[in-house]
Amino acid sequence: MTSSIIAIDAAFDSGNIEVLSIAGATARLKIRKDKHSDFFQWFHFRVSGAAGQALELKITGLGTSAYPDGWPSYNAAVSEDRQFWARAASSFDKAEDGGTLTVRYTPDSAVCWFAYFAPYSMERHHDLIAQTATAEGVTYRCLGHSLEGQPIDCLELGSGERQVWLYARQHPGESMAEWWMEGALDCLTDPADPVARRLRQLCRFHVVPNANPDGSRRGHLRTNFAGVNLNREWADPSAERSPEVLAIRNAMDETGVDFAMDVHGDEAIPAVFLAGFEGIPSWNEAQQAGFDGYKAILARRTPDFQTRRGYPVAPAGKANLTMSTNQLAERFGAVAMTLEMPFKDNDDLPCTVQNWSPERSAQLGRDCLGALLEWLDAQPSA
């Protein structure tokens, strides 16, 4: 069969790629930087006209990407139906063309999609909001709007006294965070789930599935429309730079915060881990014991979580209060934490077909809520 020239497109929700050249089934590509920013790492594009052809897609210039350590041992996500996302065999050569990821894949279909991780589209986000908002006991709130006018959606449920905030996708390219949210909300709104039933008795949940809709739609890795990293805005958010954070933090000031989880993805570390608030000025042993206790419970409940690998701990008094976890722990005395999932595989429990996946992200959302209930049951009475 004679090879035809492929076509590559990215002019759609969360699309990001620039085509440098195409020769048959081989292409040289480049990732577009976040608007008003030098961050780049997220890609999402469509290849057509390639059925039965051995694609060789070379994404170049990655030596200056946001996280160059994210490319070794990484395999690109691929889908032919946009439902099931597998991984395509990929290799990284830092000496080739400024650092090149070569992705090889032979599709059965005439059209296939590639992405840094399985995308979570804004259309799926709106479906999630619509479906959850109709569930019994759920209240919808629009906390504010992004710079491009998109709503900052918040779903609230539960009748308990403990104020629990769950929020995701401050960094829009970390799409596994909204897959986690889908799993967590599926659990919380399931009338037959006894964990959810008890959690709704103990807590008032405030859930923000996507804190950065502009960056998500634009195919950004890390920033909003203004090129601002929202997770460096929590000490002094502004309507001009970070209305998304301002809206969420103002709502938190109204309710207070007892427990908070900020959901993310990590480019380089092939593991699931938590980062805490060590180093905040008001740190105390009881607050730290709460965080350590939650980690221990989660590690026991799911083999997808571990405590050996993670980020360095900030020294006493040196925590960065512009980051949400530190700000919330300092501002409210909350047990706050950042959950990180891998873009690569989970090396402790690898999956050769999908590596870390949307399905495992959603399952982790359910597991985190199970751990939360066990943790609450071990706390002193409010």
Image: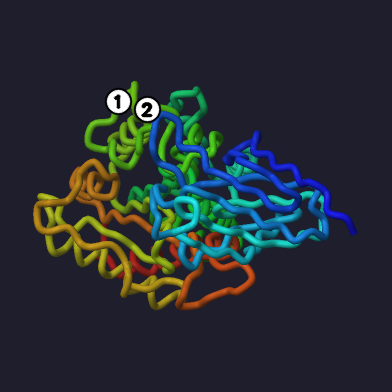
When the figure is inspected, residue 199 is found, relative to residue 239, above or below; the finding is: below
Q: Tag 2's secondary structure?
A: helix
Residue drawn at the location 90% of the way across and 59% of the way down:
1
Residue drawn at the location 12% of the way across and 51% of the way down:
318
| Snapshot quadrant of residue 222 | top left
Q: Position of residue 68 (x, y in %)?
A: 40, 55
> What colouring does the structure picture have?
rainbow
The answer to whether residue 46 is left or right of residue 242 is: right
The answer to whether residue 272 is left or right of residue 334 is: right
When the figure is inspected, residue 16 is found, relative to residue 265, above or below; the finding is: above
Quarter of the image containing the C terminus?
A: bottom left
Q: Tag 1's secondary structure?
A: loop
Residue drawn at the location 70% of the way across and 42% of the way down:
8
Residue sitting nearer the eye, 342 or 245: 342
C-beta proximity under 8 Å, tags 1 and 2: yes
Residue type for callout 1: Ser
Q: Position of residue 355 (x, y in %)?
A: 56, 68
Q: Is residue 247 visible?
A: yes
Q: Residues within 10 Å of mark 1 (few under 14, many from 20)?
A: some
Residue at which label 2 appears: 243
- Tell me the number on the disc at residue 238: 1
Residue type for callout 2: Pro
Marks 1 and 2, how far apart at CA: 6 Å
Residue sitting nearer the eye, 379 or 15: 15
Residue sitting nearer the eye, 36 or 238: 36
